[in-house]
Image (tube, rainbow, N blue to C red):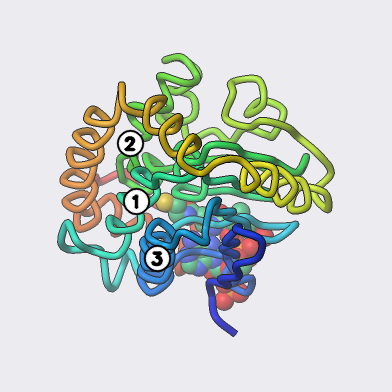
Amino acid sequence: MSDILNHTEDGVTTLTINRPDKKNSFTAAMYATLADALAAAADDDAVRVVVIQGHETIFSAGNDIGDFLHAPPATPDAPVFRFLHGISGFPKPVVAAVCGPAVGIGTTLLFHCDLVYAGDNAAFSMPFVNLGLCPEAGSSLLVPRMMGYHRAAEALLLGDPFMAEAALEVGLVNRVVPPQEAGNLAQAQARKLAAKPLSALIETKRLMKQGQAAEVRQQMADEATSFGRMLREPAAREAFTAFMERRKPDFSKV
Ligand code: COA
C-alpha cells in the first residue's frame, strides 16, 4: 500500500500519511507524492479543501533519518522543498488532524495549515538543534511570531516537546478532542468549508496570508540554505548515525 493515501470525496481531498512501521516518517518519495497531490488539488476545480492526517497514534516522526544520512536534499527543487512551497502557497483551505507525535516537519507543516484539530495525545516537537540542524518551513519566523520568543526558544533551542493543550493555548491548534474523534472533526470542518463559495475562500485566505507571504518565502529560502549545509556537517552526521545505531549522540567534538 502507498505511503501516502489520496482520496477525494465531496470536494475534499484527504491525504493520509501511511507509513506506520516507520512512525510515518517522510521519505523523499513521500514528499514528491504530496507535492504532486497538492499541485493537482490546487488546479482541480472539483477540489475545494485538503485534509492532511496521520493515524490515531502517530502523525509523523518527521523526516526519514536514513534519508537525511544517505540522500539529503541537495537542490532547491528537492521534493521536500517542493512540498513546503506547495503547502505554504496552497490557495485553498487546508485542515489537519494530528494525533500522537508530530516531530520536526510533522509540526512545522502545521503552521501552513488553516485549521488544526488535535487528539489529546498529540505531542509536538521541533528538535532541529538536537539533530545539529536549524528550523525549516519558515518555522524560525512563524514559531516566535505565534508563540512569543521565549516559548519559541524552549521549542526550537531546547527542542522541548509540547502537548495538545499547550498547542491550543498558543493558537497552533483549534480544538483538542479524543484521538478517535480528530479525523472525523477535521472531515466535518472540511465539508463545512467545501459547501462555501470557493472563490470567497481563496480570496479570504490570500488576503489573510499576503501580509507575510514574501517574508515567509524569504525565510524558507534562508533556512533551506542553512539546513542543506548543516545536513552534511559533523553535528548532524553524528546525530543521524546515533539514531540509526540507537545510542545517544556525542556532540563533545562538534
Ligand atoms: N526516520 C526513520 N525511521 C524512523 C524515524 C525517522 N524519523 N522515526 C522512527 N523511525 C523508525 C525507527 O527506527 C523504528 O524502526 P525499526 O522498527 O525498523 O527499528 C520504528 O520507526 C519505530 O520507532 P521507535 O523509535 O521504536 O518508536 P517509538 O514509538 O518508541 O517512538 C518517536 C516514536 C516518533 C518518538 C521516535 O521514533 C522518534 O523520536 N523518532 C525520531 C524523530 C526525529 O528526530 N525526527 C527527525 C525530525 S527533523
First in sequence, mark 2 or 1: give its number. Answer: 1
> Contact, CB < 8 Å: mark 3 with mark 2?
no
Q: What is the x, y in percent for residue 88?
A: 36, 43
Q: Which residue is drawn at 36% across and 61% down?
A: 39
Disc 3 to disc 2, how far (Cα)? 23 Å
Disc 2 to disc 1, how far (Cα)? 9 Å
Looking at the picture, tell me which residue is in the foreground, 195 or 79. Answer: 195
Can you identify the residue that label 2 sits on? 138
Name the element at disc 2. loop
Residue 162, compared with residue 89, is above or below; it is above
- The image quadrant where one finds the C terminus is top left
Q: What is the x, y in percent for residue 218?
A: 19, 34
> Contact, CB < 8 Å: mark 2 with mark 1?
yes
> Dot 2: within a 10 Å radius of its alpha carbon, few (fewer than 14), some, or many (20 or more) residues?
many
Residue 40's mark? Answer: 3
Can you identify the residue that label 1 sits on? 84
Name the element at disc 3. helix
First in sequence, mark 3 or 2: give its number. Answer: 3
Task: Please state which amino acid type lies under the numbered disc 2.
Answer: Gly
Q: What is the x, y in percent for residue 49?
A: 55, 51
Q: Can residue 246 be seen in this view?
A: no
212 sits left or right of 112 in the view: left
Queried on whether the Cβ of the residue with tag 2 lies below 8 angstroms from ligand 1, the answer reads no
Dividing the picture into quarters, in which one does residue 29 lie?
bottom left
245 sits left or right of 214 in the view: right
83 sits left or right of 25 in the view: left
Task: Please state which amino acid type lies under the numbered disc 3.
Answer: Ala
Q: Nearer the viewer, mark 3 or mark 1?
A: 3
